[in-house]
Image (cartoon, rainbow, N blue to C red):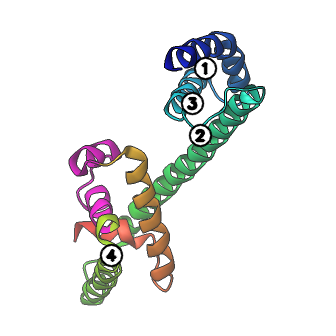
Amino acid sequence: MTADLNILYDKLFREMYSKLYVYAKRFVDEDDAQDIVEDVFVELWRRRDTVEFGERIKSFLYCSTYTKCLNLLKHHKVSASHIALIGEINEQRLLLMDEVRNTPEHQLECEYLHNQIEQAISELPEKCREVFRLSYLQDLKNEEIAHILGLSTRTVEAHVYRALKYLRQRLSHVAFFFILFFRFL
């Protein structure tokens, strides 16, 4: 039975790989298309005991390819908006640094904002808080954080996204753009 399944899988791979690759390239670039199609076949192999290699398998492969393309596009969109937000935050931080005066009022405001931010960060779930601190307080890249904590890069990105979303809501009464500015206090 296993030998027959291997032959059937191999035949399906040879027949469908290039078709799925061309299909995926309609949505994503060539490298991503190749990765997606390979992922589809790896997933099919992992699920070989539960998937029927019947007449609907080609539809299954196209649907899986389409879904993975959409997921990648959504991921790119979230990453792009995250990058844009970081750029905006950095611009605001530079503007604020130009305007900062070393006054007692400013010191009190800084202390208040710092305490508010620290309190909000401490309310994050433990792993989310740890990822956020490594990202924003220690300025590590997502790949470095993933390696240190033994997580996938996507999991790190998800934690950062959740942390930023929570902090935006939690600190809505405080200018959110102060968060990165005050990380150096």
Task: Please tell me which residue lies in front, 87 or 91.
Answer: 87
Location of residue 130 in the rendering, given as x and y in whole percent from the top left corner: 27, 64
Q: Is residue 95 left or right of residue 100?
A: right
* Residue type marked 4: Ile
**Is residue 171 covered in magenta?**
no
**In percent of the image, x 26 and y 47: which residue is there?**
150
Q: Is residue 119 left or right of residue 158?
A: left
Q: Earlier in the sequence, mark 2 or mark 1?
A: 1
- Residue range highlighted in magenta: 129-150
- The residue where tag 3 is placed is 44
- The residue where tag 2 is placed is 72
Q: Is residue 27 left or right of residue 145?
A: right
* Residue type marked 2: Leu
Q: Which mark is residue 121?
A: 4
User: The residue tagged with tag 4: helix, strand or loop?
Assistant: helix
Closer to the eye: label 3 or 4: 3
Location of residue 79 in the rendering, given as x and y in whole percent from the top left corner: 52, 47
User: The residue tagged with tag 2: helix, strand or loop?
Assistant: helix
State the CA–CA distance, disc 1 to disc 4. Answer: 40 Å
